Image (spheres, rainbow, N blue to C red):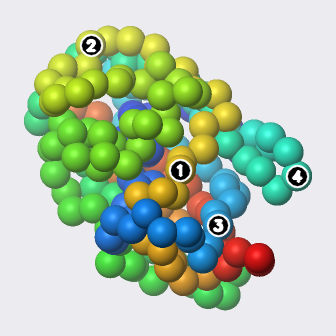
Amino acid sequence: MQHCTGGLTVLTAFVGICQLAASLNAKAKSWTYTLQETSCRSSDESIIKAETRIERMGRGEFGLSGSLTLAVQLPEDLEVEVLAYRSTDGGANYKLQPYSLQRQGIYAAINSFYKDMIMESAANCSNFPQFKDKLTVVEPHTFTFERCQVSTDAFPQYVPDGFYKLNFVTYGLVEFVWELILTIEKKTF
């Protein structure tokens, strides 16, 4: 179990994991994912403080738990970028993948990727925002999440096997890097 203190938006982290979704496809998936590691660092814990960990839920089943404390309103000029890397050799060498999210405003990312691909999964395991139209303000708050798993329903039907490293990086009022490592394997039917 890895712990992490400091850092911005685990909410942003959820936004980033969805970047493996290069296309929307509701067909049965030929793959499954397993969370492996998580870590993060923040340039200013007095603004944003986070704690994340991977928890075992059952045999071969893991979820993300932790908390995120925002001491300030999430600023409109905060930007986020998600870089997705893949390794075929057990994590020794990673190569940048096309699933990355280009640098953009945090609210643009929340109102697109989080809303379309993550929000429904977060509804039953967290107090992350739930909204219908657009989210324009995130007030100071402590968000908690317990054993969250992201549904792959909106993800591509096929994703190549390997280790994936997702780096979520924010720019602006606070610089935050959150890293998630997961493995993707073909389903055995």
Instruction: Tell me the residue that label 2 is attached to.
Output: 139
Q: Secondary structure at mark 2?
A: loop
Q: Residue at x 43, y 63 (%)?
A: 26
Percent from the top left, x then y, of residue 43? 37, 36
Mark 1 / mark 4, whichever is N-terminal: 4
What is the spatial separation of the Cα atoms under label 1 and label 4, in whole angstroms? 18 Å
Which quadrant of the view contains residue 174?
top left
* SS type, badge 4: loop
Three-letter residue code for mark 4: Arg
Return the residue at label 4.
Answer: 59
What residue sits right under mark 1 in the picture? 151
Say what secondary structure mark 1 lies in. loop
- The kind of residue on which mark 2 rests is Glu
Q: Residue 60: x and y, percent?
A: 82, 56
The first of marks 3 and 4 along the sequence is: 3
C-alpha separation, residue under disc 3 versus residue under disc 1 = 10 Å
**Residue 31: horizontal and vertical position, in percent?**
62, 73
Q: Is residue 146 in view from this perspective? A: yes
Disc 2 and disc 3: Cα gap in Å?
Answer: 35 Å
Q: Of the two numbered discs 2 and 4 on the same chain, state the one appearing first in sequence.
A: 4
Indicate the amino acid at tag 1: Ser
- Camera-nearest label, 1 or 4: 1
Q: Nearer the viewer, residue 56 or 91?
A: 56
Question: What's the CA distance linking mark 2 and mark 4?
Answer: 38 Å
Q: Is residue 103 above or below residue 88?
A: above
| Camera-nearest residue between 151 and 172 | 151
